[in-house]
Image: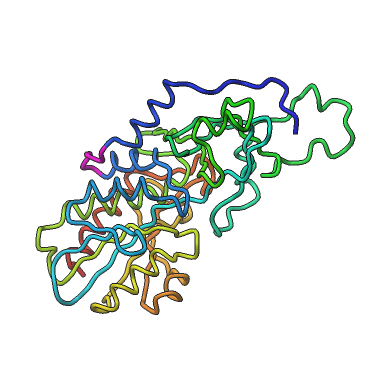
Amino acid sequence: MTVSARPRVRSSALVIVLLLAAAAPLTAQSADSLALRLAAMTAVTGYEDAMADSIRAALPGSRADRAGNIVWSCGSGDPVRVAVCSLDEVGYVVGAVTAEGYLTLRRVGATPMGPLFDQFLEGQRVTVWGRRGPVPGVVGVKSTHLQRGRAAGADDPFTLDNAFVDVGAATAVEAASLGVELLDPVARAKRPHRYGGDLLAAPFAVQRSACAALLAAVRRLPADGGVGTAVAVFARRRHFAHDGAGFALLETARGAPAERVVFVGGAAAPDSLGLGTVLAARDSLLVASTMQPVTAWNLPARYPRSPVETVSLRDVAALAERLVAFLGGAR
């Protein structure tokens, strides 16, 4: 791929905005505000430290288990009720740095995302999370002028092999001076958009909103947690076969088997979007990894697995209410 005019995308103002967004505490109490805040964060699977730290700071009494999941619990005895949401997203890492200072990418996460997922990157802003903090970049596009007269195949769809990220460096040494290294996580620049009254559009909006609902629900529980034991897990590495959630559930089962486990954050058909609907389904991956009965509570979503995945904040509030009742011991 040839990039004709090399834009300089280094912007101190943008870097400051990204740093503030990443560091700001999760002080909002409502599920709506939490969903907006979490949707603006990046947590490429395997690189969830910043988001996990934010959740832990926002949830007094929580802890990090040996797998790095954030676990909160209260109450004691039976029955044990567990709610799980996933923090991570399918994303990319730096695969190489060219002599001209461009970055190439490799996808991270085993979840199939469909043929358009990589194509959505073409010409888009991204953030590279380097050792010195976030570095803004842009994915180059083929030069319209240089493509003229080329043989058939020049219009083939964009693939990850065509992705060259410009971070404003002219050499590999300049890229390194920005703090960019191999395997640094890379994701689309997050700009959550609220529209239509109560709709929220963002990459992975369903997962982020589900975690916002769980966080809001836990904050509303009584100090003793109600009847029995309530456990909330903010899990890592969903997109590596749910291994974070699987570890947390196995650890819970060693103490006292859960009466019921609810996994929140799946995307359901959008027929009832905005009606305060939460749909139940079975989650076979977690059942297989834990040998426990697991129910998935899914949020209706439009345009799933796209940069404008959309959920209704009314549905998010309904999920929070349902989680309050579930963790508090209601039948």
Tell which of 153 and 236 is nearer to you.
236
Q: Based on the displayed image, in which of its 4 quarters is residue 75 positioned?
A: bottom left
Residue drawn at x 38%, y 48% as measured from the top left: 208
Vertical order, 315 against 234 (above or below): above
Q: Quadrant of the C terminus?
A: bottom left
Q: Based on the displayed image, in which of its 4 quarters is residue 313 positioned?
A: top left
Vertical order, 192 against 46 (above or below): above
Give the image location of residue 60, x and y in percent.
Answer: 17, 51
Q: Name the magenta segment's main secondary structure.
A: loop
Q: Assess whether residue 29 is covered by the magenta stretch.
A: yes
Q: Assess whether residue 313 is covered by the magenta stretch.
A: no
Tell which of 38 and 106 is nearer to you.
106
In this picture, which residue range is highlighted in magenta? 25-30
Q: Based on the displayed image, in which of its 4 quarters is residue 151 positioned?
A: top right
Give the image location of residue 305, x and y in percent.
Answer: 53, 48
Vertical order, 138 against 240 (above or below): above
Residue drawn at x 22%, y 53% as measured from the top left: 217
Give the image location of residue 133, x and y in percent.
Answer: 42, 35
Give the image location of residue 108, x and y in percent.
Answer: 55, 52
Residue drawn at x 34%, y 74% as measured from the top left: 250
Q: What is the image's colouring? A: rainbow
In the rendered view, does 253 fall on the left or right side of 18?
A: left
Tell which of 54 and 315 is nearer to you.
54
In the rendered view, does 43 fall on the left or right side of 216?
A: right
Residue drawn at x 49%, y 65% as measured from the top left: 241
Q: Quadrant of the N terminus?
A: top right
Badge count: 0
